[in-house]
Amino acid sequence: MNIPITKPFLGPEEEAAAAAVIRSGWVSQGPKVQEFEEKFAAYVGASYAVATTSCTTALHAALAVSGIGPGDEVVVPSLSFIATANAVVHAGATPVFADIDPDTCNVTAGTVEKMITRKTKAVMPVHQMGLPVDLDPMIDLCRRHNLLLIEDAACAIGSEYKGKRIGGHGNIACFSFHPRKIITTGEGGMITTNDFSMAGKLRRFRHHGMSVSDAERHAADRVIIETYPEIGYNYRMTDIQAAIGIEQLKKLGTIIDLRREAAGKYDQAFEGNHFLRVPHVPDGIFHNYQSYWIEILPSAPLTRDELMDMMLKKGISTRRGIMAIHLEQCYRRDALSLPMTERITGNTVLLPIYPAMNEAELVAVVQEIRNLLPA
Ligand SMILES: *Cc1c(COP(=O)(O)O)cnc(C)c1O
């Protein structure tokens, strides 16, 4: 047995689409990026989508064009991949860490509100592992305190909050196409918004602050001399990546169905095991199961790390639960204590889950956990 933690769902369709772009002679940001953006916006139900090189650069762009910078604070979860906080630092602002609800592993309006100060300009909740944050109270909180709501939706493509897909609830949402996420373009990101002026600012920011795109200039029947009203970055996706992304979007429904099916089997297999706890999905939430975690409870005969070690010896890859950013050296502040975040990061483990996972692989994971945690 050799069971990976994840496996991208790529096939001959993506191969052919990438080859067609290479043959076309236009490989940088162009018609395929535009097509991918339009299809992505339509899929999530947002007015505009802007492609970037990653979710990290998407988050940085979102903060920068919102005017968030030195002296400003942005409330984020500590229980997240480090890029969430890094993006705030790259914008020149200060990340302030909020604790989570251990049932969902997400920040709530309650945990965020405790961290709001006069310097707070935005809240950047994470739909952790694809499970949407309880957005209605978060939107209400942001309105009351006049804060921007920027969603780190890196893992949340296709997940729904109260019947509506993630991507159009807050002011801005940022997605990732890293292979660990739901669909992939190798590397890549996408920003969605319903704000026309914000979309324009984001398009210029990812293109060196330039007033026109390469495609517009190429298509023009007269000479266009570009201008640079603001300073930007090169955060452009390539047309090769976008062509792969367009094919991945076609498979997204199947990918999510297969992930949910595997998660359902895990839920069933672990039901009643009093050495562990499985994810809780609140009412009104449709979960894409970007990751599936279990919490090893204090009564268990072995620790999380021992369990991971034993599983690896059997050829089954697992990962520790989501990291806690405030415990990393580069962010450590002695005074800060986030009890729920510390409990979840220390005791949870991510199990293998991917669309092509077969029955034998799933049974092997379940059997091994039952052997180690015989409840
Ligand atoms: C993966 C991830 C990111 C970073 O995405 P990249 O596309 O790799 O930059 C940011 N935030 C969260 C919550 C993530 O899981």
Image (cartoon, rainbow, N blue to C red):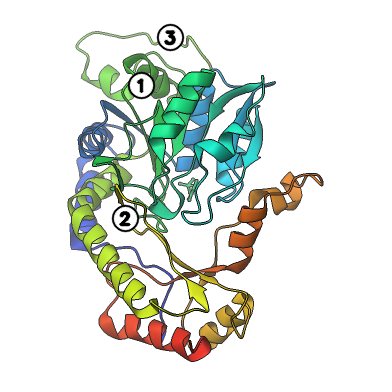
**In the image, residue 19 lies at what x, y percent?**
23, 52
Which badge, 3 or 2, comes first in the chain's sequence?
Answer: 3
Which badge, 3 or 1, comes first in the chain's sequence?
Answer: 1
Mark 2, secondary structure of its residue: loop
The reply to whether residue 98 is visible in this rendering is yes
| Image: 145 above or below 176 | above
How far apart marks 3 and 2 lie (CA) works out to 42 Å
| Image: 313 above or below 127 | below
Mark 2 neighbour density, 10 Å: few (under 14) some (14–19) many (20 or more)? many
Tell me the number on the disc at residue 227. 3
| Residue at the spot 22% in from the left edge and 45% down from the top edge | 246
| Residue at the spot 55% in from the left edge and 51% down from the top edge | 81
Q: Is mark 2 within 8 Å of ligand 1?
A: no
Mark 1 belongs to which amino acid?
Ala
Q: Is 180 or 20 nearer to us in this picture? A: 180
Rendering quarter of residue 218:
top left
How far apart marks 3 and 1 lie (CA) works out to 18 Å
Q: Which residue is mark 1?
A: 199
